[in-house]
Amino acid sequence: MALVDLVGYFNDRFEREHQAHYRPLSIENNQVTGIFGQVSISSIFLPLRQISNVTNISAYSVKIKVSAHESPYLHSYEMDNLALNSADTYIHFESIINFDRLARTVHMLNYLALAESNQLLFLEVDQRHILGIKNDHGAYFEKVIEQCGLTTKNTVIVLAITTNYVPYNEALIRGLSNYRRRGYQIALRFDHLISDKHAAELIFKLTPDFVSLSARQIETENGTNALTKLHSLKRMISTNSGKGILRQVDRKNSEILARESGFEFVEGRYYENAISD
């Protein structure tokens, strides 16, 4: 299905499901944007490369780009339905879920212009989305993926791990396990390393396909011990046949760290600059 037809299909679906009187998706210069209340959503794709062959792009991770958007034509009840910050817990979770679904739909549609056979797409899911849905995690998005002509097996669901969500780990693990049963691959993302014990527990219980770490943060927090820390984490990841991703490799020191770490995948400005030179 052509991109314009897919955008029309999902706009129709959004109108039906949310009783909205506007169509959130639009195309400009072959890029899809989504409107959520007074926020405009678009996509930034970051190439992931195998450390053994950094000239080839093996996968993409995607970051959300948001900007302000005036929505004077929205009715007050529609703004209530779309509000991101509601005092009512149920409405708040519903808003997060709706925002997360719209963002991932935008990313998937934009990914179609990049997609090649066997390339993976890493898509982050909000922790509150997982906690807000009790069953059938991934069912809604599976329909989006199928309608785009892609498969769940090439879609990696990424969960950012933070200390705020430690009390909810069991619920998060159950939700991610539901995604896996639908064929999705699973990745854990550590931006700031929590305790080795806690990281090991999560990796052991979930057995993620990928674990990603920030080279920038590893260097900042560990200094000369950065490589030792990465070797320790790589052994932990490999125990369950998972693969390591080192992100934010932006300078030569980080690139050396990436090559010596044993991690399989890398992402960062260093490679984009080196290849473009």
Image (cartoon, rainbow, N blue to C red):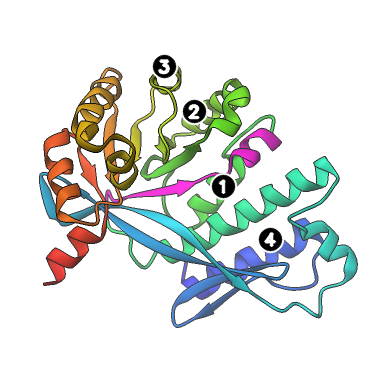
Which residue is the site of mark 3?
A: 197
Check the image and report above or below for 201 versus 59: above
Secondary structure type for disc 4: helix
Q: State how far apart marks 4 and 3 are (Cα).
A: 44 Å
Q: Which residues are magenta?
A: 117-132
Where in the figure is residue 145, as x and y percent of width and height?
49, 51
Say which residue appears at 15% left-offset and 45% top-offset.
51
Q: State how far apart marks 1 and 4 are (Cα).
A: 13 Å
Q: Amino acid at mark 3?
A: Lys
Secondary structure type for disc 2: helix
Which residue is the site of mark 1?
A: 141
Secondary structure type for disc 3: helix
Q: Is residue 209 magenta?
A: no
Q: State how far apart marks 2 and 3 are (Cα).
A: 27 Å
2 vs 3, front mark: 3
4 vs 3, front mark: 3
Where in the figure is residue 155, as x and y percent of width and height?
41, 45
- Image quarter in which the C terminus is found: bottom left
Left-right relation of 235 to 208: left
Say which residue appears at 51% left-offset and 33% top-offset.
179
Left-right relation of 265 to 171: left
Name which of mark 4 and mark 2 comes first in the sequence: 4
Q: Amino acid at mark 4?
A: Arg
Name which of mark 1 and mark 3 comes first in the sequence: 1
